[in-house]
Each structure stands twice: as structure tokens, then as C-alpha cells.
Amino acid sequence: MTDRPIAQPLHRQLRDLIVARIESGEWSPGTYLPPETRLADEYGVAVGTLRKALLDLAAEGVVQRRQGKGTVVASHDSDAVLFRFFNLRASDGSMLRPESRVLARARVAIDITDAQDLGLPPGAAVIRITRVRDLGGAPILYEHILLDAARFGQLATHPEVLPNTMYQLYQNEMNATVHRAREALSAVRAEGACARELGLAEGTPVLQIRRIALDYNNAPVELRLSWVNTARLHYEAMV
């Protein structure tokens, strides 16, 4: 028996090489990749092997294959981001379009638990964005967004007005694409600013959603803590 690592299939190695070039900014969202024959020549592989790597990337949502045009790096738009990552629904199951209000932005030291989720050392500097999400003018969600200050420090002040869908901003302005997310749900009681901003009495039960947003290589991009008043809505996910 050997302890030597098992090499990845060639098409998976190609997949990783292409992702690295996307993450470096060489191929930005909305950019078409070079033709398959040119890429295959560049990497010294058969076109079929390269195509298998591109099909894997298309299945993951990293790229899109467009008939007669080629392969384009996938990009976030506001609706796609909202409906893919926002799992709260109205009581009748319909999708929601909440609006966001930023309450505060600050540079703070991260605690031990949150540091683990972001892959940072305890006490590292992070940007904390505090927001309320409104539906029909009424608050439904209170949240903290935590980001590594070394990478996202400009968000402490810029842009002056933050968009409703942050993932689109990360991709377009900071070359950080959220590819998937992991969420954990808990039943907790609203306290302090959370209760106040949601217009609830102290101790009212709310749903807490702890979401770690991940990039193409499953590295953490953002940690988001949300507290939801479920009186008018519910959480829904496809499994």
C-alpha cells in the first residue's frame, strides 16, 4: 500500500487550471474563452479532454456553453443572485424581492467562531456591514455581513451606496465570485438591535441563518448572519 497521492484525471486538472485563470481576472465574467482548439493546443491535450473539462465547468455553473458562439464565463445578475441564494418565500410559496437598508459599516476584530468560518485567525480585521431587508416597507430580516478586510477593505466606505445584491458587487468590482453557499438554520430569540430593527418584543422567536458563501474552489468569501421574522414568510430549499 502506498501513501502517494492519487493524481486527478487530466480533465479535472484542466478544470482547475481554467478556474485559476478565471479567478486571477484573466477571463472576467461575461468574457468568452478562446476557441477549444486553441486552448487544447495551449495545454497540449486532445480537444475531447478539454471539452470534458469545459462540460464539468458548465455543470458547476462556472461557465456557460452557447451554441455557435463558444464558452463564456458565467456572470451574476441581480435577479439570478436573488432567486438562487435567497431561500425565503411568502406564505403562498411565491418568491420575494426585498429591499435593503444599510445601518452601519465598520472595521472590527473577528471572534473565534466567525474566524473559523471565514478561514481567518481570531482577531483578524473584517468589514462588518449591518443591514435590514424590507418587504413592502416592513422589516423582515436583520443581518450582519462579515468580509476579510485585507481583501474587501474598501467596502468600509466605498461604494457610498451598496447594492441590494452584494454578490454581484463582489464579482464585478473585486473579482470574487460566490459559486455556492452553505447554510445552517437555528431557532433563536430576538434581542437588542435585532429585536428593535425588526419591530419585535425582546425574546420573540426568530429564524437565524448562518451562511458561508464559497468561491469556485470552496474557499470562503463571506460570512452572513441573518435573523428572520417568519410571521409573513418561511424558509424553502430544494434537496
Image (cartoon, rainbow, N blue to C red):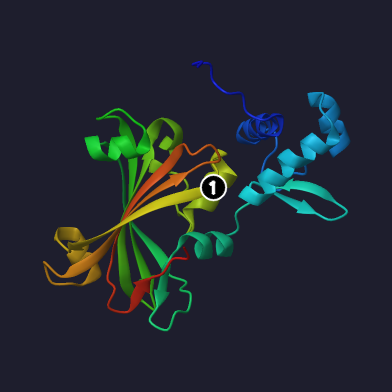
Q: Badge 1: few (under 14), some or many (20 or more) residues near its Cα, within 10 Å?
A: some
Quick one: 46 or 174, which is closer to the camera? 46
Q: How many numbered marks appear?
A: 1
The residue that mark 1 highlights is 179
Picture coordinates of residue 180, whole percent (x, y) = 50, 49
In this rendering, would 89 be left or right of 18?
left
- Above or below, comparing residue 41 to residue 140 in the picture: above
Q: Residue furthest bottom?
A: 92
Quick one: 175 or 117, which is closer to the camera? 117
Residue 34 makes an appearance in the image: no
In this rendering, would 174 be left or right of 197?
right
Picture coordinates of residue 85, whole percent (x, y) = 48, 59
Residue occupying the point 36% across, 76% down? 137
Residue 142: name its quadrant: bottom left
In this rendering, would 38 be left or right of 178?
right
Quick one: 74 or 48, which is closer to the camera? 48
Residue 83 makes an appearance in the image: yes
